[in-house]
Amino acid sequence: MQTEVIDSIKFSILSPDEAKKLSVVKLTVPDTYNEDGYPIEGGLLDQRMGVIDPGLLCKTCGARAKSCPGHFGRIELVRPVMHSEFSKIVYTILQSTCRNCHRLLLSDEHIQEYRSALTKLENAVEDVEPEAIEERVEAGSLPMLKRLKNMKKCERCGTSKGKLKFSAPTYFYVDDYKLKPDEIRDLLSKISQEELEILGIDAGTSRPEWLVLSILLVPPVNVRPSITLESGERSEDDLTHKLVDIMRINLRLEQNLNAGAPQIIIDDLWELLQYHVTTYFNNETASIPPARHRSGRALKTLAQRLKGKEGRFRYNLSGKRVNYSARTVISVDPNINLDEVGVPLEIASKLTVPFYVTTWNIDKARELLARSEYPMAINVISKDGKRKRVIDLNREELIKELQPGDIMERQLMDGDVTLFNRQPSLHRVSIMSHKAKVLKGRTFRMNYCVTPPYNADFDGDEMNLHVPQNLEAQAEASYLMSPQYQVFSPRDGDAIITNNEDGITGMYLLTKDDTYLTKEQAVYILSIAKVYELPKPTKDGLYRGKDIFSAMLPKGLDFTGKSSKAPFVIKDGKLVDGVVTKETFGRGDNKLLVKIGKDYGAEVLKDFIFVSAKVADAYVTLMGVTVGVKEYTTSSKLEAERVRLLEETFGKINELIAQYRTRKLEPLIGYTLRQSLERMIIAELNLVRDKAGETLLKYETSEENAAVEMTRSGSRGSVLNIEQMTMFLGQQATLSGGRIKRGYYTNRVLPHIVPGDVRPGARGFVSTSYYSGLAPTDLFMHAVGSRSSEVYKALLTARSGYLYRRLSNALQDYCVDHDYSVRDANNNLIETIYGGDAVNPVFVQFQKLAADEDK
Amino acid sequence: MAENKNEYSVEYGDPVGMIAAQSVGEPGTQMILRSFHLAGIESTISTSGLPRIIELVDAKKKPSTPITYIYLDGKIGKDFDKATETLKKINEVRMSSIAKRILENFSKGKIKVVLDKQELESEGITIKQVAAKIDKALNLESKVEDNGVVVNMHTRNLKEIRAATINIMKMLVSGVDGAGKATIRRDDKTGEFYLVSAGSNIEGIMQVEGVDKERTTTNDVFAIYRLFGIEAARNALAFELKKTLKEQKISVDERHLNLIADAMTASGSIKGVGRHGLSGEKHSVFARAAYEETLKHLIHAAAFGEVDPMRGVTENILVGKQIPIGTGSVKLAIKKEDMAKIKPASHK
């Protein structure tokens, strides 16, 4: 539970008086260290502003570097300067007010009009949130601003407004006379509070004349620490450099003023001071050259510290660094459950979990405290908040002192709740809670069935592990973020944690109609599923694969798959008919996992996925499944078929071209003759691709061919993949989605092609296969296609990343209220009932299934 | 509604907005090059995939490829010839597309428009019609001369003649202004003819006789907004999002897409999700500053004395508070002090 609460934060402008009060020292010397390497008093690293060197004491608060929060100093500018970032607002105010009577240019009636509109608005919406009013007032004042801008003279005293010109970033001219900052300040300070309120400015906290700076607040030294280089040289922060510049010019200006220097010199220095202050706030101010370091690198000043992806807001405030985390390479272990993660001992002994000492567990705590190897205590935090590291010297003492209410930090142990994450964290299942399982080795181990939500593979991927540090967090993590509750994707309710790869191949092979196992094999497989009861054998003393699969199903399951290809029927927990494929586990209408999840709950579902994957692996290992060149070696029959198919298609296309040439081609409705021809050719080429796939499956019927078997089971590879390896690559496409048409000049792809040739080969159709090897021209076409898709991919990831950022930023505040309406942060109604029916998308498949069953 | 709650319902505090954003954002990278699924005969040339999603979510005033699907009234839709007739009423033809060239004779004050016979024929327009159009537009008499129309300007003012020429070039010869080039299509299932036009002046198109006003629709969300209002625009937006994702074979529950459409239209007008739309209009200064244009928002907040109410996600993360979403939105119903006042219920 959080105790301190920030209710709201108000923004305002710092007044010179406040700045004076806030600062602890007036800085006078434009330098940092003296010859002895000691901070100069009154200099920019004055020790009254805090210290950065360890061991030194702050001269204001007396604390050491670590605990001193730092204190502001100030520079008193001898001549005031404009705050460049606010000059646009100053311009608006100057434009709206009279320089003679210092009131708004409008007559009393007009002002009254606006004011009454304002109060009316305020009274009418008294029960509405104050911010809402503010927003409306701002919007309401816009037409007024426009009106003021166009006013030529004051309606009250008749003084002409003159030609007011604003030249970014800080110059103002009236009828070509340049206004000095102090003149601007005088003008602004004479505007009354009421007038400013009409403009929407909260004059109580933000007087506009404070935008003309006479006192510059200097941030504490720990905001701009100096670094000691290896050579012993001191290197100052960019801000310090800039402040030195400001002070130097300020001092020179003062000296010149005192010496009574000519006005032109004073003005020059004044302008220089303005430049330095401007770049101190923002070194990327438009129409001003950025201040540079000696090396030519532009200085990073205040604005640059806040802005952008690496700025304070996005880098340090929206994203924070954390303790209690670890990162290493991941690898597979099918013996680890879905909701577990194998943690290397090395990591487990560094990460700690709080152990809340009570009267009931104090003995256990003492036991851990007494240990000096792996499961041991690291720190003891006594009730008064003092943290002591457990070392051999103080162990005995700590054991004695330990009492209920203390918190002991122990090493990570089996069963501890952890959060496991892989970046990019694109959706909520990119972070899930896994129970720790401390193992030998140096990688995180995970079950491969949970890789899809993380989009992880084991080719060197690294993942992060976090340890929640209080009971509330641990409880939330294990009840809301555990993989068993995340099996179904919040995107569409389909299973996202499922069997995949070998987990499917094995199940497929096991449940085929002609799969029989010997008793030895059956016992082995069943023992992996932890089933110690053999199903009924056949006459020959063999065991059906389907029966072995049935042994893993929950008791009494009735299920009929809706797969279009083959029936899939489970009756009373027995697989009666059908073969397990990707469809059985995965997406689409075949919802075995949905059924189990709905009728038996998350725990059973998790175990089913885990056990079936493990069994599948064991079976694949037992039988041996491998893919090699032989899978992609074409028979002469298939080769002949390939040649025939291509010849047939090319023949048809040549005919189409001939018809086009003689204008006999019947154009498609809505297309020109030329477009029609192109579309027809593309259609033909698509057709031959599909036909080739069919032919392939027709000829490669042998179940010996592992590649085709994998495709059939849906575990890996598509018909198209095999087709490209054995038959031909097919059409290569470009970014625009059409056939390749340019590359060499005059309307052709390669020099040897006749310009205007529209035949397949000339436009990127590759009729050779990976197995046979690509013809030189084909290789070129293939390279065009590859490059194109590579370029597109790079483009797409950047674009979709930004889309995601914008979407999540816009929608992140929306959540469901008690009445199922969707509200934003200010309780505005977005949807009256979420989705129209308040159904959680995670459960849409459950609901569909329930509806089907009710029928 | 509350009584219909069951185990499949959403729960109080569910961050449905974030989940909707993730559901669209996460598959973004999966929207692949249409390389192997080259356009078949049926598909159109409209923007699709990620660019289209971005366009919709940005609330672009005009889609990069506006398309109107014009359905025809019963009988006309069945008859190719009648459908073609309607097509000609709609299909936007500009003078510049049928004129071979325009000759200006400044000394005589005449303009001659030489027409392309082939184009005229294919658009089904006669030279006389063209002449009549010009007469009406310029309020002058023009003559038909072999392959063109001659306009006598009765002036030798260069400026006037040039202005008239430009006017003539831009002139709408036939069809509906802003309807774009229309083509005829046939629905393979029903055998019905319908029109597809590359423009989105749905208002103008619907006034053409024979157009089925109920089924005719466009992919231009703003055109629908202008003609039918915000609720229709919300539906159109959600429909377009669904269609685009379906084309890419990405399954996303419609509730997510509906929420995005609802969020964009909740204010009564269509707002994009970017810095000029929903994100830029948040109340929280910090949320806006942490998103984009950090300085602008901070400066404005200081000058106008804005108050950050600290009710959203971003601002609470910034200051290290618990976020008011999900389990963080649960508050105590009774204050600790008030607990003492409550007497324990007596059990009988």
Image: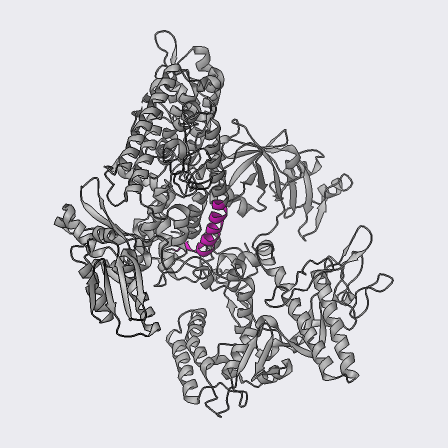
- Residue A644 painted magenta: no
Left or right of residue B46, residue A732 in this image: right
**Figure quadrant of the N terminus of chain A:** bottom right
Residue plotted at (77% across, 80% down):
A256
x and y, in percent, of residue A693 in the image:
35, 25
Q: Quadrant of residue A27?
A: bottom right
Quarter location, residue A423: top right
Horizontal side, residue A657 vs residue A431: left or right: left
Q: Nearer the viewer, residue A207 or A717?
A: A717
Can residue A751 be seen in the rendering of this structure? Answer: yes
User: Seen from this angle, which residue lies furthest right?
Assistant: A36
Query: Residue extending furthest front?
Result: B107
Residue B251: percent from left, percent from top: 37, 41
Residue at point 32%, 28% (across, down): A649
Q: Is residue B155 above or below residue B52?
A: below
Q: Of residues A798 and B39, which is closer to you in this image? A: B39
Q: Nearer the viewer, residue B147 or B262?
A: B147
Secondary structure mostly seen in magenta is helix
For image coordinates 76% across by 82% down, the residue present is A257
For this view, does A346 lie left or right of residue A458?
Answer: right
Farthest-out residue, bottom: A157
Q: Quadrant of the C terminus of chain A?
A: top left
Q: Is residue B230 visible?
A: no
Q: Which range is magenta?
A: A795-817
Q: Position of residue A264 (x, y in %)?
A: 71, 81
* Mark count: 0
Q: Hey, which residue is sitting farthest left in the picture?
A: B75
**Residue B88 location in percent, x, y?**
20, 54
